[in-house]
Amino acid sequence: MNETLPLLVYCALMSGTPGPNNMMLVANGAHYGYRRTLPAILGINTGGAVQTFVTCMGLGALFVAWPLLHEALKLAGTLYMLWLAWKLAVAPAASDRPPERLRFSQAALFQAVNPKSWVKAVTVASVFMPAQWSVASGALFVSVVGALIGFPCISMWALFGVGIGRFLSSPARRRVFNTMMAISLAVLALLLMR
């Protein structure tokens, strides 16, 4: 199929570039390590795959018919990211009390309000769905490909956080890191709202 390579590249770019998911994974990786961040990685991947599948099956058409629904989800996602940024910024700097760990269910459900995830799902549904397949087969194919490509891409962000975490031995360094991550997440949220 001629669309597979472009789909792989698109999924790698969308999963591997900075976004709300990856900023949260860096913070979680730094504070909790890779193994304890793995549920969040799996939650992001699962939530994204379900979102892509549902969008391919027709949810994207709702956004075209009712653009206000898309705008409402975008606003909810922005507000949620700003709330996460605030929680990270005010988290205690003491090394024994890191910010709250992102859980599987939280990460999966976050995809419903993550603007970047919606852009990815709608683009995959409108550009990369195999025309010669049934809708369900095509939706399943692109969703699975996205999850398979996404897992190593977002894992790298968590591993990047693990590497940074080694330098966060003092409360002062941890405070600076939390503040930088909170600012990054807030700026990203506001940029995605445009």
Image (cartoon, rainbow, N blue to C red):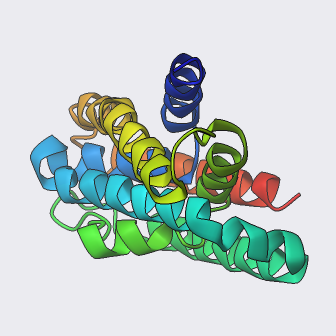
What residue lies at 41% left-to-right and 43% top-to-bottom?
141
103 or 59, nearer to the observer: 59
Count of marks, rendered view = 0
78 or 187, nearer to the observer: 78
Residue 50 spot, x, y in % from top left: 42, 64
Quadrant, the C terminus = bottom right
Rendering quarter of residue 135: bottom right
- 152 shown above or below 9: below
Answer with left or right where residue 56 lies relative to residue 73. left
What residue lies at 36% left-to-right and 45% top-to-bottom?
144
Residue 133 spot, x, y in % from top left: 52, 44
Answer with left or right where residue 143 lies relative to residue 33. right
Residue furthest toward the left? 35
Residue 89 seen anywhere in this rendered image of the structure = no
Residue 162 spot, x, y in % from top left: 24, 35
160 or 11, nearer to the observer: 11
Rendering quarter of residue 48: bottom left
Residue 106 spot, x, y in % from top left: 36, 74
What residue lies at 87% left-to-right and 77% top-to-bottom?
65
- 172 shown above or below 52: above
Residue 194 seen anywhere in this rendered image of the structure = yes
156 or 15, nearer to the observer: 15
- 73 shown above or below 162: below
- 133 shown above or below 55: above
What residue lies at 49% left-to-right and 53% top-to-bottom?
139
